[in-house]
């Protein structure tokens, strides 16, 4: 049995099968082949260009008119205020947070008011004291007038001298003057109390109009001042309020096309955040001033629908529409695409249409551009996905990688 085991071992080591190093060599070759294949695949993927896409858009707007011009801009608030205090003080209460809706006159914050409250109480006490002096002096005047009447009666009957009657009359005149003086003192005390009340009211910050808080600029314990005090330790505002009913759009229109925009012109707005939501709008005014650096003119556009989704500083695209026509009017021919989507290949104007993971070159015919967009009269259909800014080496049928979809 021992000899048989030894013979078996010898057959495993020196028998007719391939040596062990052959199997190791085969395994190494397989691993190298897999690595080479993966490297080739990665290289091929790295050669596929990444492209941005957009959809060809049908001409015409939901507002019933045709788009004659497009421009981009931002939502702005015509009524916005950074609320601050009218005196310097330390915040003891801040009664709002960002996003809160507030009413006109609502209390937003309070300052430390111990000193001003004491001043107000002293001024109100002075008013009461002055008013009491007026009442006392009026009582003395009434007594003097009674004495004068008795002296006049006694003088008429000869029972007293005229000098006593004159003295009584002088006392009446003196008390009359004193009453007037006390009234003036009471008026001055009331004015001081009113001033103290105003100063005390300055410790309470109220909303100047209804709106939404968009920024909270100070916290309890911080010093707030209406004036800027260097050093960075003093706040100049408590918060920012925006009247959401005053939202409108500011767009910059190229000065070469500004002649197409008129007051009250119908328009349509599309927010970047909600590309499928078309908002009816109209032109408020063309601001009579141009930006020399950008060669643009600002146009104010009103939104005809108010919605809580619209917030300040949102990006927006505005289509200026031709006036509505009576009766049925056929839409203008062609589709709108970004100008950068139309390129020249072999002497012909083409647009690359996305077909799966490839780009197919379509020969197109252009019309008169509309603002920043090209008008393709033939070769494209509305809704077809196209390549924006196609690489120079992109050919018909070339493979592509999609990185974003345009609006």
Image (spheres, rainbow, N blue to C red):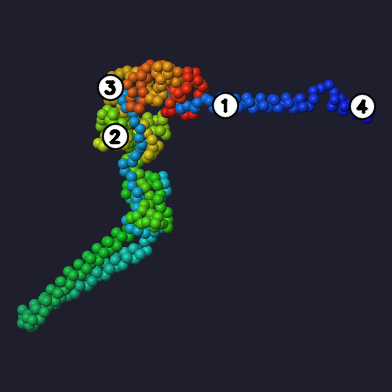
Q: Is residue 317 above or below residue 160?
A: above
Q: Which image quarter is the C terminus in?
A: top left
Q: Mark 3 points at which residue?
A: 325
| Place of residue 309 in the rendered image (x, y in percent of width and height, measured from the top left) | 40, 37
Identify the mark nearer the N-term, 4 or 3.
4
Would residue 11 appear left or right of 337 to someone viewing this image? Answer: right
Q: Distance between the residues labelled 2 and 3?
A: 28 Å
The reply to whether dot 4 and dot 3 touch (C-beta < 8 Å) is: no
Identify the mark nearer the N-term, 1 or 3.
1
Q: Nearer the viewer, mark 4 or mark 1?
A: 1
Tag of residue 297: 2
Residue sitting at x 56%, y 24%: 44
Q: Which of marks 2 and 3 is in front?
A: 2
Q: Nearer the viewer, mark 2 or mark 1?
A: 1
Q: Callout 1: 10 Å neighbours few (<14), some, many (20+)? A: few
Q: How far apart are marks 4 and 3 (CA)?
A: 107 Å
Q: In this view, does 378 lie above or below 280?
A: above
Q: Name the residue under label 1.
A: 43
Circle 2 — which element? strand
Q: Distance between the residues labelled 2 and 1?
A: 49 Å
Identify the mark nearer the N-term, 2 or 1.
1
Circle 1 — which element? helix
Q: How far apart are marks 4 and 1 (CA)?
A: 57 Å
Tag of residue 4: 4
Q: How far apart are marks 1 and 3 (CA)?
A: 57 Å
The reply to whether dot 2 and dot 3 touch (C-beta < 8 Å) is: no
| Place of residue 375 in the rendered image (x, y in percent of width and height, measured from the top left) | 36, 21
């Amino acid at each position: 049995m021992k000899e048989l085991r030894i013979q078996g071992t010898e057959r495993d080591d020196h028998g007719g099968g391939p040596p062990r190093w052959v199997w190791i060599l085969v395994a190494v070759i397989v691993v190298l082949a897999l690595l080479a294949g993966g490297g080739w695949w990665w290289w091929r993927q790295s050669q596929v260009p990444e492209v941005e896409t957009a959809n060809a858009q049908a001409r015409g707007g939901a507002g019933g008119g045709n788009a004659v011009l497009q421009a981009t801009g931002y939502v702005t608030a015509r009524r916005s205020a950074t609320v601050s205090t009218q005196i310097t003080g330390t915040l003891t209460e801040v009664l709002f947070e960002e996003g809160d809706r507030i009413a006109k006159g609502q209390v937003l914050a309070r300052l430390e008011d111990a000193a001003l409250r004491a001043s107000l109480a002293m001024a109100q006490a002075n008013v009461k004291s002055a008013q009491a002096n007026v009442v006392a002096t009026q009582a003395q005047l009434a007594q003097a007038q009674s004495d004068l009447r008795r002296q006049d009666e006694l003088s008429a009957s000869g029972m007293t001298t005229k000098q006593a009657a004159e003295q009584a009359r002088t006392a009446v005149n003196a008390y009359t003057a004193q009453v007037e003086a006390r009234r003036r003192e009471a008026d001055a005390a009331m004015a001081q109390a009113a001033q103290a009340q105003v100063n005390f009211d300055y410790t309470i910050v109220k909303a100047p109009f209804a709106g939404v808080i968009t920024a909270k600029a100070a916290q309890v314990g911080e010093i707030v001042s209406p004036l800027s005090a260097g050093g960075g330790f003093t706040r100049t505002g408590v918060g920012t309020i925006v009247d959401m009913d005053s939202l409108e759009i500011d767009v910059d229109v190229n000065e070469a096309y500004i002649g197409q925009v008129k007051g009250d012109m119908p328009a349509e707005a599309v927010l970047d955040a909600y590309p499928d939501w078309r908002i009816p709008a109209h032109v408020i005014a063309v601001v009579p001033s141009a930006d020399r650096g950008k060669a643009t003119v600002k146009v104010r556009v009103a939104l005809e629908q108010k919605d809580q989704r619209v917030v300040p500083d949102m990006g927006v695209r505005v289509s200026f529409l031709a006036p509505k026509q009576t009766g049925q009017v056929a839409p203008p021919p062609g589709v709108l695409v970004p100008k950068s989507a139309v390129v020249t290949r072999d002497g012909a104007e083409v647009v690359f249409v996305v077909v799966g993971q490839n780009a197919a070159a379509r020969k197109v015919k252009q019309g008169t551009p509309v603002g920043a967009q090209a008008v393709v009269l033939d070769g494209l259909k509305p809704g077809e996905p196209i390549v924006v800014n196609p690489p120079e080496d992109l050919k018909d049928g070339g493979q592509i990688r999609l990185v974003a979809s345009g609006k």
